[in-house]
Image (cartoon, rainbow, N blue to C red):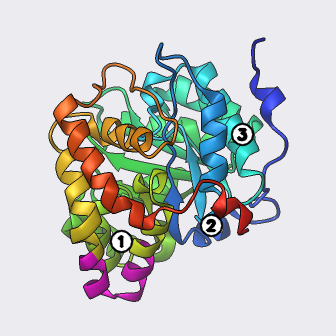
């Protein structure tokens, strides 16, 4: 029987009800859970696995859950599939935290996905860069304006890849898009990001988005939260990283980075696309359904899977038995 997004929604947490977009953004502190999108071996969407994974993740105190983001393979999904992923995530979260929906592609499709995501119960929109890598500033701004105008939901911009901004550009975009409330950095240029933050002050909420390996740099310049792909395999580790960063406990942070984060990211750097493939391989090794990646991403090579398997023995220090987190709510 065909599944519809409307049939999946059983109520959002309504974090945005009677709350201004800016007040909503100010609450997003700590860690964003960033679930992968599970596929079956034939590359079809596995919504049952997604629901189970998100339910387990939402037992931890993430500030929000992101559906169909970069780690969620947004650009490999159809628009209908994106809506289903958002609706499934909303249902599985069951009001425990806001759900942020990824959008992208182009202005028309991005706006359409944003409207569908709102109907599916999302409470915030995360705009990934448009498809065109050489867009002039005016065209780039028009893209974000179209997405921002499509829904009254708070908007986050994910500045990654070719979506590169100066401090002044961020200010001009905030002038033109009233719903823009948060900035997710995906460039990893800490010096430039600090200049962007200093120039724009508390006008936006500042988020770290390049990866768990950038946590020390991000929190050293004052981000309020970061997005974690490690949240898929070790939620407690993600939360410990953010806690150490927010407290300025860099001795503890460096210890966690050296033992857990750097070894994983060293494997992720072995091939393009491994930022998703390596996480899915790790999840499967730990008994968490994830499945393969869709092209143009590439699944991990056998040698790399064996190295991930060895590393997951270390990660088990941060794992708890399946279902235990849910029972401890």
- Crowd class of label 1 (few under 14; some 14 to 19; many from 20; radius 10 Å): many
When the figure is inspected, residue 75 is found, relative to residue 164, above or below; the finding is: above
Identify the residue at horizontal 48%, vertical 76% (top origin). Answer: 202
Q: Secondary structure at mark 1?
A: helix
**x, y percent for residue 155:** 57, 51
Q: Would you name the residue on which mark 3 appears? A: 118
- Crowd class of label 2 (few under 14; some 14 to 19; many from 20; radius 10 Å): some
In terms of sequence position, does the residue under pointer 3 or pointer 1 come before the other?
3
Asked if residue 116 lies left or right of residue 66, the reply is right
**x, y percent for residue 188:** 24, 58
Q: Would you name the residue on which mark 1 appears? A: 197
Asked if residue 99 lies left or right of residue 15, the reply is left
- Crowd class of label 3 (few under 14; some 14 to 19; many from 20; radius 10 Å): many
Query: Residue 106 or 34: which is nearer the viewer?
Result: 34
Q: Can you tell which quarter of the image residue 278 is in?
A: top left
> Does residue 150 show up?
no
In terms of sequence position, does the residue under pointer 1 or pointer 2 come before the other?
2
Q: Would you name the residue on which mark 2 appears? A: 22
What is the quadrant of the C terminus in the image?
Answer: bottom right
* Main SS class of the magenta portion in the image: helix
Check whether the beta carbons of the residues at disc 1 and disc 2 lie within 8 A of each other. no
Identify the residue at horizontal 23%, vertical 53% (top origin). Answer: 265
Q: Can you tell which quarter of the image residue 256 is in?
A: bottom left
- Asked if the stretch drawn in magenta spans residue 12, the answer is no
In terms of sequence position, does the residue under pointer 3 or pointer 2 come before the other?
2
Q: Which mark is residue 112?
A: none
- Asked if the stretch drawn in magenta spans residue 249, the answer is yes
Q: Bounds of the magenta span?
A: 242-255
């Amino acid at each position: 029987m065909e599944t519809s997004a409307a049939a999946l929604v059983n109520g959002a947490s309504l974090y945005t009800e009677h709350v201004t977009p800016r007040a909503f953004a100010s609450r997003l502190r700590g860690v964003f859970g960033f679930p992968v999108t599970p596929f079956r071996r034939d590359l079809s969407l596995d919504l049952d696995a997604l629901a189970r994974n998100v339910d387990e993740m939402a037992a931890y105190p993430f500030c929000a859950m992101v559906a169909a983001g970069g780690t969620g393979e947004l650009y490999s999904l159809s628009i209908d599939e994106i809506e289903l992923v958002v609706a499934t995530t909303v249902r599985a979260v069951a009001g425990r935290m806001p759900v942020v929906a990824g959008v992208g592609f182009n202005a028309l499709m991005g706006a359409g996905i944003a409207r569908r995501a709102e109907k599916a119960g999302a409470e915030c929109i995360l705009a990934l860069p448009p498809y065109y890598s050489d867009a002039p500033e005016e065209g780039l701004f028009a893209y974000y304006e179209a997405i921002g105008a499509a829904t009254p939901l708070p908007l986050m911009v994910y500045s990654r890849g070719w979506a590169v901004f100066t401090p002044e550009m961020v200010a001009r975009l905030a002038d033109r898009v009233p719903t823009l409330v948060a900035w997710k950095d995906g460039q990893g240029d800490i010096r430039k990001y600090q200049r962007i933050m200093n120039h724009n002050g508390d006008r936006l909420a500042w988020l770290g988005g390049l990866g768990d390996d950038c946590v020390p740099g991000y929190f050293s310049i004052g981000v309020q939260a970061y997005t974690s792909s490690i949240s898929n395999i070790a939620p407690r580790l993600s939360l410990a990283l953010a806690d150490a960063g927010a407290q300025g406990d860099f001795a503890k942070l460096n210890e966690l980075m050296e033992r857990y984060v750097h070894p994983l990211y060293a494997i992720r750097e072995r091939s393009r696309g491994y930022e998703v493939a390596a996480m899915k391989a790790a999840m499967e090794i730990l008994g968490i359904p994830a499945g393969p990646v869709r092209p143009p991403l590439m699944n991990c090579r056998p040698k790399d899977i064996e190295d991930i398997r060895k590393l997951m023995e270390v990660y088990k220090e941060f794992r708890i038995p399946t279902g235990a987190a849910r029972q401890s709510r």
